[in-house]
Amino acid sequence: MRVIGGLIQALAVALVLALTLGTLAAVAWRAEEAPRLGPAEWAAIRFTLIQAALSAVLSVALAVPVARALARRSFPGRSVLVTLLGAPFILPTIVAVLGLLAVFGRNGLLSVLLVLLGLEPVQIYGLHGVVLAHVFFNLPLATRLILQGWLAIPAERFRLAASLGMGPGEVTRVLEWPMLRSVVPGCLLVIFLICTTSFAVALALGGGPRGTTVELAIYQAFRFEFDLGKAALLSLIQFGICAVAALAAWRVALPGGFGGGLDRVVERWGIGSFWLRAQDAAVVVLAAAFLLVPLGLIVARGVPGIGSLGAPVFAATGRSLAVALLSALLTLVLGLALAELAQRRRGRYAAWVEALAALSIAVSPLVIGTGLFILIFRLTDPVALALPITAVVNALMSLPFAYRAMAPSLAEIETVYGRLGDSLGMRGWARLRYLVLPRLARPMGFAAGLAAALSMGDLGVIALFADPDRVTLPMQLYALMSGYRMEEAAAAALLLLLCSLGLFWVFDRGGRLRAGA
Amino acid sequence: MLALEGIVVEQGNFRLTADFVVEAGARVAVLGPSGAGKSTLLSVVAGFLAPDAGRVLCDGQDLTGLEPGERPVSIVFQDNNLFPHLTVAQNVGLGVKPSLRLSQEEAAKVEASLKRVGLEGFGGRRPAELSGGQASRVALARVLLRARPVMLLDEPFAALGPALRTEMLELVREVAAETGATVLMVTHDPGDAARLGGQTVLVADGMARAPVETQALLADPPPELQEYLGAG
């Protein structure tokens, strides 16, 4: 069993290396035959950087007042709201886009309102649409990270400030500003990094020469121009952008859980004025509306059509569920194997393993997809392997989060029970079965839920390979949207939303129950 | 017979040496100030810590290079002796086979050892449902079942009240007598050493000294022990 365990660990390392550095090497090799960068490619690079920078700055700037309000006010529904802030992480991108269209689109709520007032309807497609969607996804993330910073300020400091007679302005300068200075840069970097790999948002809301990200350009070179060399060159550029951003953001702030420990409110003094309370209330209401109205519209518009969904949608749902479950299983195996490896070999090796687990943050799914295509298209038909490839690439994308969830728990298990297990001669399967798995149930459930939900809603690598007759649910939804079959699209979006959240809930809940048993 | 031959452990400024023999079946308290290296000594025998020099022999067998689970040794820690997610019977059963695939006969032995420590019918419970004393009894039931020649106890009853501690020490003596095991028990309490009723290894000033009769030692303590005990 020890041998098998070692073998699985070696295979996990080999698979992660092959999928990240291996595909990158294939891309680099193929990029040599590419033409030089044209104006369209430069435009894509420029657009990628500008939209990511704008998205990061706007998300963080808007998150600061929301986090401050959440940190210092307690109100009914606060903990629900904090939990909801974690939800966009597992929300399928394409569903959110549909929800945003329902509010900000040409026929959306906002446009209807503007037309009633005699104004022009809003135009969502282009840079501002992409940035809007990215803010929708990352405002909650930024809020949670900054809220953590706020709650990390010891309550005694606020008490001391109150006893010294400091007003809100002085508290901000003395206590809150230094905290923000340490938290905000990491937050900006993480969101910038996330937005540089944006594909589905750009696909749905960008497009055209002035709204194409590098990821989208890879897809277009691949799918419409059949120019593998150009796709490879763009992949190399994409990797460069990601790698620089990832190095900067390394270890800064990846979400390790959903709102854990964010449940308390710091007791504060001197913030009872009507003006401050009204300000906080307005901020919270606006933020909640920005997040909830689009989702509410998905539900409201999806319910009537759900009975009339066609067989293709259900077939796509079945395929997506299978991909999601496979991906979750693979994520757990990879995450556990790497976490065990880091545990067994402490010191410098452990740092390498940790870096390996995080490597996929710097490699975008489309780069991996392009590399895989280059590697296998001479051997077999990549389209026939579209679903397994999607599951594998999705697992790789979830790996950093799964590792972060499981590795610290595994280390704790070894610290507390390792010697007892050793003294009883528990090794290999017995150790895994009776020590590791039962005690790791909770983080494993969380990781599996995350991986399944992310895979369920993923619209990335599948777009490169997909066979039009065997698509996943997000692909099917995108096709419905492109065909302006909006009623059916709304119903399919609701179904996708339910599947993603349901998968996360089932796994996370299962882990908690096992851990409690 | 347990022999520690020229043992040296060095960790930064910390240094511990040991070179002595413990007779088979002896009950030995390991006494000394905190930080002197009492637990380190047990870790070396249990195989958690490889000494920088020297070796441990048990009945002539060199233990160097053996994994903790392969050594002829059972150990009871200060806490976390039971896995909270397993039942009492499973926790004891691990002492028979780590795979927990027990035959009917082996399962009966588990039940018998639980009965022996006064926990008949407790097999289906989880550790969270036990009192501190009961948890200690479960750990001793497992030691009884494993019946290894050496029994190591690392301040196992420190969290228990005086009456329970006396009771547990009595049980330790009985288990040791039934299995014929050599006992090494770390304690910081001279009273526990006296109640164990055998010999004492004094660990102080970087050295674990050869075992001597506890009664004689406590009656006429050497200077290092006097310093530890305080008012002489």
Image (cartoon, coloured by chain):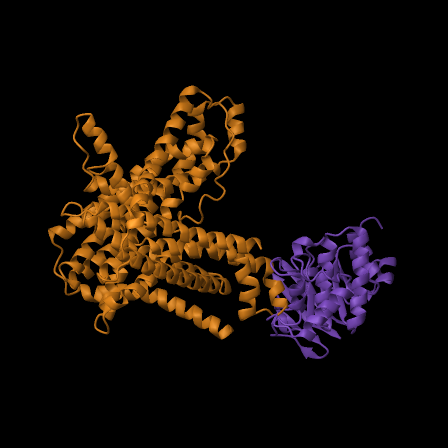
Chain colours: A orange, B purple
Total labels drawn: 0
Residue B223 visible somewhere in the drawing: no
- Residue A318 sits in quarter: bottom left
**Farthest top residue in view:** A274
Residue A162 percent location from the top left of the image: 51, 24
| Residue A436 in the figure: left or right of residue A456 | right
Q: Position of residue B45 (x, y in %)?
A: 67, 68
Tell me residue B25's x, y (percent).
79, 72
The relative height of residue A357 versus residue A308 in the rendered view (above or below) is below
Q: Nearer the viewer, residue A315 or A206?
A: A315
For residue B67, above or below residue A510: below
Q: Which residue is outermost to the front?
A: A307
Q: Is residue A4 above or below residue A389?
A: below
- Horizontal side, residue B121 vs residue A399: left or right: right
Q: Which residue is at a point 52% across and 52% down the rendered structure image?
A: A512
Q: Nearer the viewer, residue A155 or A383?
A: A383
Residue displayed at 24% across by 33% down: A110
